[in-house]
Image (spheres, rainbow, N blue to C red):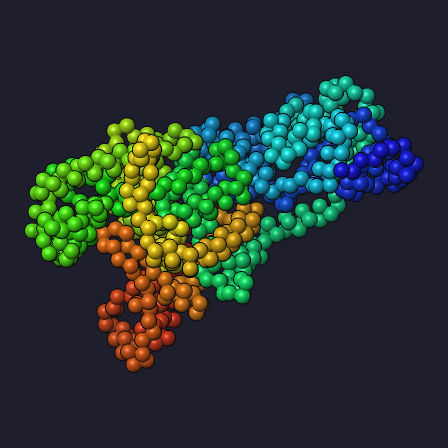
Amino acid sequence: MLLNSDPRRPLQKNLLTHLHRNRQAVPPDSRALLEAIDAIAPEAVVFDLFDTLLVRDVHPDDVKRIACDRIARVLGTISGKTLHAERMSIEAGLRRENAAQGHDAEFCFDAMAGRLAEAARRSGAGMARDRLVALIGDSELAVEASVQHVDEPMRDVLAALYARNTPLYLLSDFYLGETAMRRVLDEHGILHFFDAVFISCDTLQTKHSGRAYQRLLAHTQRPAARMLMIGDNRESDVHQARAHGLNALLLDRAADAARYHKAAAAFEDATALAAQVRAQVSTSKVAGEDTVFRELSLSLYFFVQSLHARLVEKGAGDVFFLSREGQLLKRLFDRYQAHARFEGECFVKTHYFESSRRASFMPSLGPIESETFETLFRQYRRISLAEFLLNLGLDDQLDRFRALLGPNFDERSDDLPSSEGFRRLMNDAGFRAIYAARREEQIDGFGQYLKSFLRRGANRTLHLVDVGWKGTIQDNIFQILTRNLPDTPFDEVEGFYVALLEPGRAGERNRKHGLLFDTLANHVAAYPAFNENRSLFEVLLAADHGSAKAYRIDETGCAMVERQTSDDELNLFYSKVQAVQVDIERQFEQLCECLLRHRWTHAELLDMAARAHARMVFSPTRGEVEWFRTAWHLENFGVFELNTFRAQALRHSFTTRMQTTLHLLKGGPPRDLGVWPWLTLHDQTLALLPLAYKLFRHGQLRRRRKLFPAISAA
């Protein structure tokens, strides 16, 4: 800690005289500043806040622009630019009104937020006024917190003076009041240094007019000549302070002014920012190894940003990420909120909810007398009796019913629901008793598990997040809550997905939304890119644990989730997926640092993400192709099979590729193109067709961007 023991040293007097006579500013260096303070030997020291103690990473005016963009994303009815222009007009009007009433030309943020909320509601925002006012305030504080940092030499100065027991005061011209600024100071760890905090908007008295100094002196009851003001503004912090009898030191922040000018120019340069983002997510070498599918970080950033805005708009205090794809999605969402410094109305508490189609299936079913197992049979009718029991979680009953139903028990039937073996099983009294007991056990286990989560709010809607594509787990959970759990804390379910292709059992109380694309809501501008090789999402969003199999209540009465662990899945995760996830998270962090501090409309970010995603799926590197060829996926519902992608991605001979190419060029029906059509064409046809396919999809992207102007709202 820097502390001068003798404030009367000639060196310090000479320094003070030199600074005063030459009207020079003190450099933001702790030793130099403490020497200047010691030369004056004040009884108390008063500090300005912004650009004195706290320094921003963006231009101060851009803080308001970023805050308006964030609010606009939540509302979805007005652009950030329009909201910002409305705000500037309101602020100017408040300053004029206050000046006309004899106050300084200052305004209070709360008054501005109220009028801005009313303007947004006139533009179609459906959020209640009080919630919207709170959202505006929390957004402002979040942006300020995310772009500020304490100047460390100034922290040293505060600590040195505090150790001397020198009374310290904060005096700032700002539109956020004392309560809000105390919160900011506390987050930065410097609130405890100050005896009192004075903010101009609380009394509409500013340093610039000098009235704030009158307020300061009246409150402290200290002689002005024994007080010292330190700040970066020559008029407000020096001239006005001296005019009211205080000593004053001007802090040299010329370098910060130049930095702000550069930051403001960068903020408006969308082309340079887009290039920076593309470079950030492009493939490169890390520790000598080629990265793969790095652009997925940008697709997931768009998903997370969209998800956050939708949840805040709906007032969701809590959100449940479904295992297993939700494990990485939850981590990214948490990182996003942490970087953005969201609190209050802007913050959503996250939970990791272990479930699966298999685990949620049995507790969603009705009594055996009326159950048709439609959720299973609408997609999987060609299965065996053994597989049917596995879907019910009755693994421990396989031997019993194999002996009862005979040798065909493990053989797949072309249509199991209409088979004689299935009829016999349904009519068996033993099966019916086991089914009833296990169903009740699973319902109780699920209910206890759901209640074990400590929620932030009391919202009656259960908000879920998963990868997609139909929302079957959500349908099962909705059935459990509305049919089998009469004392549930939830009345309805709302799911948010990477993408949505089919409605399943979606309805008024069981709503579903796809955020990268949603064929049900006609949100398909980026469909050609994001729909190509959807398996990539499933493989790369793998978790480090097995699939949820069933819900149990242990001997202590606590809920637990029984998992089905597969060596194949764990081997895939640790040998291939984990390293890619680490790289994706690293890039996601960098995207947060960059994109949260710049202006991007929803449409601009979607367009950039779609273009980046298109590179992965239509122009993959050799390393990416090989990575995918050697991946696999284990099906844990319906049929229990390990699916590899190598079979559909083997390079065919030249002759075979020629024949397939001619067949397609002559208008023959396309064969099964598999989960990644571009790769199938690459391996099974000549180079002309995958190139043509790529150009066709890129053309679709360009045309769809023009056809869906509604997404251009910020």
- For the point 50% across and 32% down, the residue is 344
Q: Identify whether 662 is placed above or below 450.
A: below
The mark total stands at 0
Is residue 84 among what the camera can see? no
In the drawing, does residue 515 fall left or right of residue 400?
right
- For the point 29% across and 39% down, the residue is 551
- For the point 7% across and 51% down, the residue is 420
* Residue 91 spot, x, y in % from top left: 60, 33
Residue positioned most to the right: 10
Is residue 180 among what the camera can see? yes
In the drawing, does residue 518 fall left or right of residue 148?
left
| Closer to us: 513 or 486 | 486
Where is the N terminus found, in terms of image quarters? top right
* Residue 35 spot, x, y in % from top left: 83, 37
In the drawing, does residue 128 fall left or right of residue 221?
left
* Residue 253 spot, x, y in % from top left: 74, 43
* Residue 609 spot, x, y in % from top left: 45, 55
